[in-house]
Image (cartoon, rainbow, N blue to C red):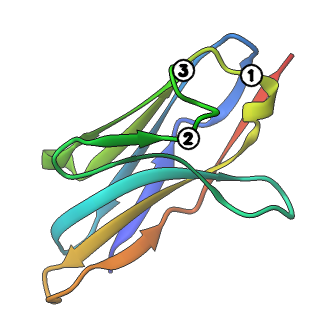
Amino acid sequence: QVQLVESGGGLAQAGGSLRLSCAASGSIFSINDMGWYRQAPGKQRELVAAITRGGRTNYSDSVKGRFTISRDNAKNAVYLQMNSLKPEDTFVYYCNADIRRATDSYYRNYWGQGTQVTVSS
């Protein structure tokens, strides 16, 4: 069984910072792309940032210059440093990863359970 467990969400004031963490656990052989998505109630989930195994990153225009994604391949973990937060960054944030289990010859896509980020003005 593979799981993605997020932590680090919470309440922040506008202009403040939060750091999200996500760790993959289980019988993992390899992890390819990892990323963070966010979703508001009744809306589609949207990509915030993604990072390849080699460290190449991609950001949505709405967070460029404010958020930084990083990963630690040895720990099977991905992080999202969120600076200069705005009230419009208030969402549930989800971790996502393409993971190959030790018993598989292919990659599956996994989601974390989500963590709430609320930014007050």
Q: Residue furthest front?
A: 61
Specify which label sits upstream in the sequence, 1 or 2.
Answer: 2
Task: Name the amino acid type tagged 2.
Answer: Ser
At label 1, counting other C-alpha atoms closer than 10 Å, the crowd grade (few under 14, some 14-19, many 20 or more) is: many
Label of residue 66 in the image: 3
Left or right of 119 on screen, residue 28:
left
Which of the 4 image quarters holds residue 55?
Answer: top left
Circle 1 is placed at which residue position?
A: 86
Between 55 and 105, the residue placed more toward the observer is 55
Q: Position of residue 46 (x, y in %)?
A: 64, 55
Label of residue 60 in the image: 2
Task: Name the amino acid type tagged 1.
Answer: Lys
Q: Position of residue 110 (x, y in %)?
A: 42, 72
Which of the 4 image quarters holds residue 27?
Answer: bottom left
The residue under the point 15% across, 67% down is 30
Which of the 4 image quarters holds residue 90?
Answer: top right
Label of residue 42 in the image: none
The residue under the point 34% across, 44% down is 78
Specify which label sits upstream in the sequence, 3 or 2.
Answer: 2
